[in-house]
Amino acid sequence: MSERIPVCVAWPYANGSLHLGQIAGAYLPPDIFARYHRARGDEVVMVSGSDVHGTPTTIKAEQEGKTPQEVAAFYQQEHLGCWQKLGISYDLYTTTGTENHAEVAQDMFLRLLERGYLYKQTVSQAYCPNCRRFLPDRYVEGTCPHCKSSNARGDQCEACGKPLDAPDLIDARCRVCGTAPVYRDSEQFFLTLPAFRDRLLEWVKQQTHWRQNVLNFTTRFLEEGLIDRAITRDIDWGVPVPLEGFEGKRIYVWFEAVIGYLSATREWAGLHGDPDGWRRFWQQEEAKSYYFIGKDNIVFHTIIWPAMLMGYGGLNLPYDVPANEFLTIEGRKLSTSRNWAVWLPDYLSRYDPDPLRYVLSINMPETADTDFSWREFVRRNNDELVATYGNLVHRVLTITYRNFDGCVPSPGTPDEQSRQLIQGAAETLQRMDTLLYGCHFKEAIRTAMSLAHEANRYLDGKEPWKVIKEDRQAAADSLYTALQVICGLRTMLYPFLPFSSQRLHEYLGFEGSVEDCGWELQALPPGQKLRPPQALFSKLDESVVEEETSRLGTAH
Ligand SMILES: [Zn+2]
Ligand SMILES: [Zn+2]
């Protein structure tokens, strides 16, 4: 029975380049998951897009003397290019700037209003008398009341990490012109989150398949109690509030961006000529939706978005939210402002995508923070991808190609070792199936790599390159067995290493795409014509370590 899987991926702000922390945390895991499910024959729709609203984009636009639209369009293009090069296989990567998204977000707003989950209240809001406009939290700067850092923002102090409200700041000023803000009354809409607390607690209790950190965080948050949150603001960049008399107001980005998962699925269905096609992913009970995010985003996906869905009614709640922990870089906390980061466009301009996918997968920050270092990157590329997996593939393919007329040899009766190895491959696939289904990606790729190790040991024992001189059939037997295992590894590693798996698929003489061969040990038939093999991976020089680490922390 095939399953229906909406794969919902965090929406990056369209205000800067992507970096490795985001890839390891939120963007690579859903791609592995989607590829695995597609190979399994499940119906997947993987969606995301640029979060174009929100002050990060308007701040960037002001810094560069551009419009927010221009900034968003620029990074949308850059991100699309990166996804393609890294092989992140979205079914749709759109933006929150579409007409469709505005309609779906406004529909959510109106339904929640109609059902009594939104209410109006007058609040005091920072206003710059010089710029003559209301100031979003991030546009008010001043001295932190906790740590006295002079560059705290009206939503948070970066120096001590404490959340703030603009009126808390000492010597507050407008970040655009430096004038001290005044506070003016303004009417805003609020979401009655506490109304959902009991239902949320009840629901969360049943999610025993969630990761422990996600479950703990969510439960603690709910037990501490929820407060009403403003969902509109006096700004001009964002989705308009769909009510007369509120023309100058916009829906707050935190409320509107999460609706993107739904609006993007609707857009995808429309683009495929099936405007109702989104319903089977969002309304049929058997559909299981997964949300891939970093740990800083948990509350929006396990509390706020589910509350909105409960309030709206008739839409599926998240099935799983496998949030990842953080990736540190060379042992230090990643910081984009200090350029302590590895930027994805830089990486992709110099190296192949699969080694990065490999290193981030085998060391994925699933249950604890993990570290990326260039030394480990080079080591894992050279010792594991090249020397273990790549070498296994290359020696088997080249010996076979040269000695058996470029065809898969015909085996005799397999001996005990060969049977065991094939049995091991079947068990590995089975084990990986369980792991991938449960979003345990790190363990899954480690399992595949230990099969590659085993196959190398098998070959070292059989030595077909020596044996072939006196016993051609014995060499044919062991090469045939090794080829079957390699053919299995091509499938098992496909979700992680799609580019090299596809090449291997072709060297093995298959047509079409690996994904279409299904999630199974496909037999490689004797006599199948192979294609001339080439190395799957290239060794990296040690100098890469020095070269790359010297870029960290310097002006970007
Ligand atoms: Zn101002
Ligand atoms: Zn502070």
Image: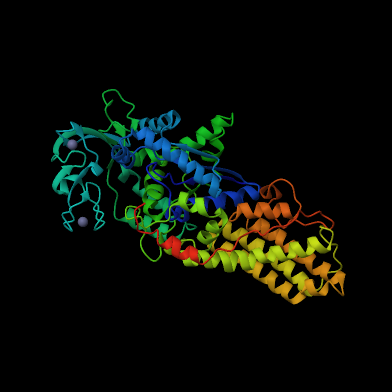
Picture quarter containing residue 269? top right
Vertical position of residue 95 compared to residue 523: above or below: above
Of 541 and 320, nearer the camera is 541
Compared across the picture, whether 217 is left or right of 169 comes to: right
Name the residue: 64% across, 65% down.
389
Q: Position of residue 27 (x, y in %)?
A: 48, 50
Front-most of residues 124 and 58: 58
Please name the residue shown 44% across and 51% down the image.
293
- Quadrant of the rendered image holding ligand 1: top left
Query: Horizontal placement of 419 versus 372: left or right?
Result: right
Q: Is residue 167 left or right of residue 89?
A: left
Whole-percent x, y for residue 229 in the image: 28, 42
The image position of residue 478, as x and y in percent, is: 79, 69
Give the image location of residue 315, x and y in percent.
47, 39
Taking the view exactly as shown, the residue that stands out farthest to the top is 244
Q: Is residue 7 visible?
A: no
